[in-house]
Amino acid sequence: MPSEYARLFDGAQSVLDSHRGLDYGALEVARALARKLRAPCVAATTTRLLVDLNRSPHHRNVFSEYSRVLDAAERGAVLHTYYTPYRRNVERAAEAAARAGALLLHVSSHSFTPVLNGDVRRADVGFLYDPARPIERALAAAWETALHARAPQLALRRNYPYRGTSDALVTHLRRSFSARSYAGIEIEVNQKHVGSAEWPALVGALAGSLTAAVATV
């Protein structure tokens, strides 16, 4: 939490520490995937309760109920300082791939709370993608198959616990770049595993299985 905005969250520490404040484990997974593939890792560590970097700038939830009280100029400053640089870093990579006639594979790392509004999420890992984009569909299937081979005890699902076409950075980039130059996959890991005894092995399996999947697509 940037210190200049801490005042907005007085008495809200429990919310900041919850799944609403951050995706537990997602940064560790992102770094492991980047190391394994020798790819850049674009990451930010500002709580999404200040600004949600995965939402479109005019989405109703890009600012939370805590930060929505900022006036227009202050919200603009938050976007300029925290939101835009992160998004532009990924956009530049996609632009470079398109200019080179190459395909950019963008893996966006997330995690989800095991129980939401009383509903138990019945998956350990979810692969989110756009079924209308053949490379994304093939890569999600290949990644699921490769991960199952390494960790058959895990419950794996596609486009769960969210739809792969919901508002996100990957959906924004799909509108900007053709399926020939951009493929975006969101990985969702159940937070019940984060910090557990099996967590390091799960992170390793995610990275190894992605490498195997990329080689087959």
Image: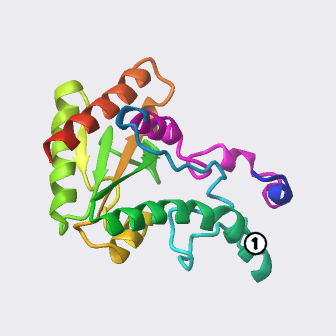
Q: Vertically, is 60 above or below 31?
A: below
Q: Nearer the viewer, residue 189 or 117?
A: 189
Residue range highlighted in magenta: 8-34
Q: Nearer the viewer, residue 122 or 124?
A: 124
- Name the residue rendered at 54%, 66% in the picture: 88
Q: Position of residue 85 (x, y in %)?
A: 61, 63
Residue 152 in view in this figure: no
Q: Which residue is mark 1?
A: 77
Q: Position of residue 202 (x, y in %)?
A: 36, 27
Q: How is the image coloured?
A: rainbow
Residue 31 forms part of the magenta stretch: yes
Left or right: where does residue 208 sit relative to residue 32? left
Which of the 4 quarters of the picture holds residue 4? bottom right
- Name the residue rendered at 47%, 54% in the picture: 117
Amino acid type assigned to the residue bearing label 1 in the image? Ala
Q: Position of residue 46 (x, y in %)?
A: 66, 52
Residue 59 in view in this figure: yes
Q: Position of residue 121 (x, y in %)?
A: 35, 46
Q: Vertically, is 163 above or below 113?
A: below
Left or right: where does residue 66 sit relative to residue 11? left
Residue 39 forms part of the magenta stretch: no
Q: Vertically, is 29 above or below 141?
A: above
Which of the 4 quarters of the picture holds residue 35? top left
- Name the residue rendered at 57%, 70% in the picture: 61
Left or right: where does residue 170 sit relative to residue 147? right
Label 1 Cα neighbours within 10 Å, binned few <14 / some 14-19 / many ≥20: few
- Name the residue rendered at 22%, 58% in the picture: 136
